[in-house]
Amino acid sequence: MRFPLLPLVAAILVSAVTSCDPAGPAGGPPTESQGTGIPSKEAAPGAVAVEAVAGQGLLESIDPQDLNRPRFHDFGELIYGDRLTWVARFRNSGRGPLKILNAQAACGCTRLAGMSVQEPGAAPRIIRSFRGGVITSVPAGAELEVSIEVITAFTAPNQRKLALFRMTTDSDLDPYVTLELGFLPTRPFMLAPTEARLLNVPTSHGGKARVKIIVDRKETLARILEVESSPDGLGVELVTESFGGEYVWYVDVEVAPLSPLGVTRGQIVLRTTDRDGSGEDGRLEVPVIAQVVPDVVLAKPLVTLGAVASSEGAVFESELNALVPGAKIKVLDTRVESARPVPLEIETRPLQPDADGRAAAWSVRITMPPGAPPGFVAGDVIFVLDEPVGGVGPDGASTEFRVLLSGQVFEG
C-alpha cells in the first residue's frame, strides 16, 4: 500500500536533475550546483527521518566531502590526462530494500568503474554486470559503494568541469540519485593542430607537417626541452622561438622520400620542465599519423560495386589524382583482371589537361551494364599510365596502378 503523501515527500527530497552544461536555467549564469564548486545549502537527500514510511529504501551518503552537499565531490586541480576514481558510499537508511535500476554517466568524461553491496557481518557482494532491469538490490541497513572514474583527457583542458553521474532507483522517496564531480584539468601547453597528420604522402616526394606549441596558462613556467622519442621512420625536429619572453615551439615532422608504403601511428614524446620551470621530468605527447601511398591514388581506395541487381547494373565514379605537387599524368589504357569474366566499361577523362593531354586529375567512371551473370565480382582494375606511379614493387617500378574490385550480382 502506498501512502498518498509519498509523491509530495519525493518532490521535497529529490533535487532537480542537472546536466553537464555549465550554464544555468534558461541560459543564465551558473547555479551553485552547476560547476562553480561552491557548496549549496540545500538539504541532503536521505537526511530526513523515514520511519513513518513502510517498505521504502533511501540512500544516505556516508562520510561525504561536504555535509551540505553530500553527493558532490571536488577533485580540485588535476593534471590533464589523469584518470582518477571517486568511491561514493551510501547506506540504505530506509525500512525496506532499494533496487538500483540504472546507472550511467551524463557525458564521456566519467564512467562507472565498479559497484558493491555489503550487508552487516557479510563479505562485500561485487556487482559484475550493470545492465538489465535491475542492477542490484540494497537491503535495509546495507551499504552501497559506487566507483566512478574521471577521464580528464575527454574534457577541454584548463576549463572547470562539472560531470554528472545518475542512478535510478525504485524508491518513491529518492528515485533519482545524481552525483556531481567537479575538477579542473590543467595543461600548460596547447597544440595547434592537436596532432601531426601526414596523410596521402606520395612515396617519391615525401611530406612534412608542423605542430605549433604555446604555453596555455600564463602563470606556468613550464618549458619544452627536447624530443625524447618518436615513431620509427619519421624525422622529428624541435624548433624553439622566444618573443619578448614568450616561448613558442614547433615540432616539425618529416616523411622522407622513398619511404615504404604503409601507415605509421604513434606519439612524439617531448621532455619538459616541471610547471614551475625546474627539473626535466615533465612529458608532453604529440599524436602523429603518417600514411605513405603511391604517387597516384584513386580518391575512393576501392572499386566497390556493392550488391547489384542483374537487370539494373551499376555505376562507380571516382577520381584519379597525382599527389606529387606539380605532377601530371596520362592514362594510356585500362583493363580488368578477374578470375571470372566481368563485363565492365571503364571511361577516363582528364580534368584541365595541358596541350599534351596530361592532367593532375582524371575522372573515372566504371559501368556494369544490365545483364551481368549472378555471382561475386572480385579482381583488379588496372590503369596504365605514361610514367611510374611510385612505390617500387618486387619487380621494380611500374606504370600500372592497380585498384581492388569487389561486388556481387544477384538475380533481379
Image: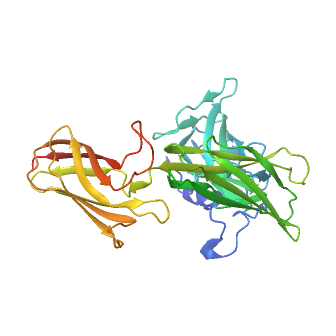
Q: Residue furthest top?
A: 122
- Residue drawn at the location 27% of the way across and 45% of the way down: 380
Query: In the picture provided, is 399 more to the left or to the right than 160?
Result: left
- Residue 312 in percent (x, y) is at 12, 57
What residue do we see at 14% from left, 43% from top?
341
> Is residue 343 rendered to the left or right of residue 386?
left
Instruction: Evaluate whether residue 178 shows in this view.
Output: no
Query: Residue 155: which quarter of the image?
Result: bottom right
Q: Residue at x 50, y 49 (%)?
A: 292
Camera-side residue: 324 or 213? 324
Q: Is residue 114 above or below residue 361?
A: above
Front residue (pair 274, 44): 274
Q: Position of residue 297 (x, y in %)?
A: 40, 55
Q: How is the image coloured?
A: rainbow
- Seen from the viewer's position, the closer of residues 77 and 266 is 266
**Residue 53 in the image: above or below residue 143:** below
Q: Is residue 131 left or right of residue 306?
A: right
- Identify the residue shown where x is 30% and y is 52%: 384
